[in-house]
Image (tube, rainbow, N blue to C red):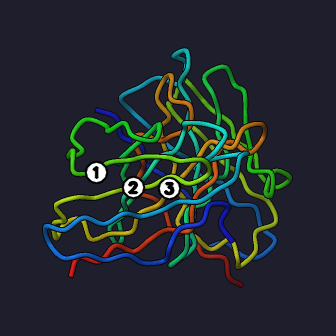
Amino acid sequence: QITLKESGPTLVKPTQTLTLTCTFSGFSLSTNGMAVGWIRQPPGKALEWLALIYWDDVKSYSPSLKSRLTITKDTTKNQVVLTMTNMDPVDTATYYCAHRPVGAPAYFAHWGQGTLVAVSS
Amino acid sequence: QSALTQPPSASGSPGQSVTISCTGTSSDVGGYNYVSWYQQHPGKAPKLMLYEVSKRPSGVPDRFFGSKSDNTASLTVSGLQAEDEADYYCSSYAGGNNYLVFGGGTKLTVL
């Protein structure tokens, strides 16, 4: 059974850096073809893909946020970490991590429950 | 503004069918057969309903059907049931550096 869970601060101040951790089980990110991504959703708004990290440490970022995002993995801990710099109130959203199965061109089969992050002074 | 265009709302009575469209460009929806659909109930995480245009993950009822023509993908839900009431999001592979784009979401109401 595949599970993912996001963790991190619920409140950050403008200009601060957000660090979120995705802890997963039921698969290994060292398996050929596997990937984990981050997606966010502002309250009442649509989903927005942020970043993806592959089993071979290749990384992909949303072009509009690339300069602010860093995604890393710790295969031994079954964790993926997303950092976003220079946070702004418009970054207030529920942040999800999700599992991209082996051979899946572009979809996420399993999602975490999400974590709501508010940006406010 | 989302990369893919969906109608903000759709509705149907129990037992009826409803179709939700998802319009993109030749760089995303039209360029690849990698359209996915997600169902999201209030306060819950999205759930994958269809992938690669029309494939259903295990456990998704065959009442959910996907198709694509040119730059527009569609999700059809037949035999509407109360539990189908949710937000639905389409997504598509966009190639290159822009891995994945989403639609703005459609709120499906079962009357």
Q: Which secondary structure lies at badge 3?
A: strand
- Give the residue type that dot 1 points to: Phe
Q: Would you name the residue on which mark 3 appears?
A: B90
Nearest-to-viewer mark from 3 and 2 = 2
- Mark 3 and mark 2: span between their CA atoms? 9 Å
Query: Marks 3 and 2: CB-CB under 8 Å?
Result: yes
Indicate the quadrant where residue A71 lies.
Answer: top right
* Residue occupied by mark 2: B75
Q: Relative to residue B23, is residue B73 drawn left or right?
A: left
Which quadrant: the C terminus of chain A?
bottom right
Tell me how far mark 1 sits from mark 2, CA to CA.
7 Å
| Mark linked to residue A115 | none
Crowdedness near tag 2: few (<14), some (14–19) or many (≥20) residues, C-alpha within 10 Å: many
Residue B64, numbered label:
1
**Mark 3: amino acid:** Cys
Q: Amino acid at mark 2?
A: Leu
Other residues around mark 3 within 10 Å, as few (<14) / some (14–19) / many (≥20) = many
